[in-house]
Image: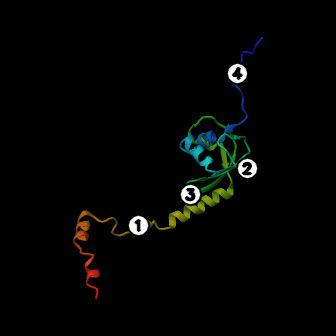
Amino acid sequence: MKSAQPAFDKITTGVRLDKWLWAARFFKTRSLAAEDIGRGRVQVNGQIAKASRELKPGDLLKFRQGVVEREVWVRGLSHVRGPAPQAQALYEETPESVSLREKLGEARRLAPEPAQSITQGRPTKQDRRRLADWDRWSASADRD
């Protein structure tokens, strides 16, 4: 007699890396997570990983999120994206990663924004008209 359990209902011990990064709210979509993984920006236990890599609790992930390098321990697995507190329970960030992230955040806060140093900005329509009236070729024509 055949078992009552369907064939597609197989039990897995891990979760795909791209799915976990999405569920843990490190990436907005699963395809963005898979794209970064495909570019070799995500390491699992010190090795560059593929999106289909099965994660297990205790794995160490190293990846870049924007300009910030993050290092997290996998503490839980989830196939679904839940609320932020539930997602934060899936990982634990290493102390080195936290301190580096805080230092970079402080440096960004203290560094001046380059765009703030621009006093004039883009020329207005009136400025462009004045520039068009200016005969910029006259100086080179008077050479002797």
Q: Find residue 67 and name its label.
A: 3
Mark 4 residue crowding within 10 angstroms, few (<14) / some (14–19) / many (20+): few
Task: Quote the CA–CA distance across marks 1 and 4.
Answer: 62 Å
Residue type for callout 4: Ala
State the SS at label 3: loop
Q: Earlier in the sequence, mark 2 or mark 3?
A: 2
Residue tagged 2: 45
Residue tagged 1: 116
Q: Find residue 7 and name its label.
A: 4
Mark 2 residue crowding within 10 angstroms, few (<14) / some (14–19) / many (20+): few
Q: Earlier in the sequence, mark 4 or mark 2?
A: 4
Residue 34 percent coordinates (x, y): 60, 43
Q: In the rendered view of the protein, which quadrant contains the C terminus?
A: bottom left
Residue type for callout 3: Val
State which mark lies toward you, 3 or 4. Answer: 4
State the SS at label 2: loop
Residue at image coords 33%, 64%: 122
Task: Quote the CA–CA distance across marks 3 and 4.
Answer: 44 Å
Task: Quote the CA–CA distance across marks 1 and 2.
Answer: 42 Å
Q: Nearer the viewer, residue 33 or 25?
A: 33
Q: Nearer the viewer, residue 34 or 62?
A: 34
Q: Earlier in the sequence, mark 3 or mark 4?
A: 4
The image quadrant of residue 21 is top right
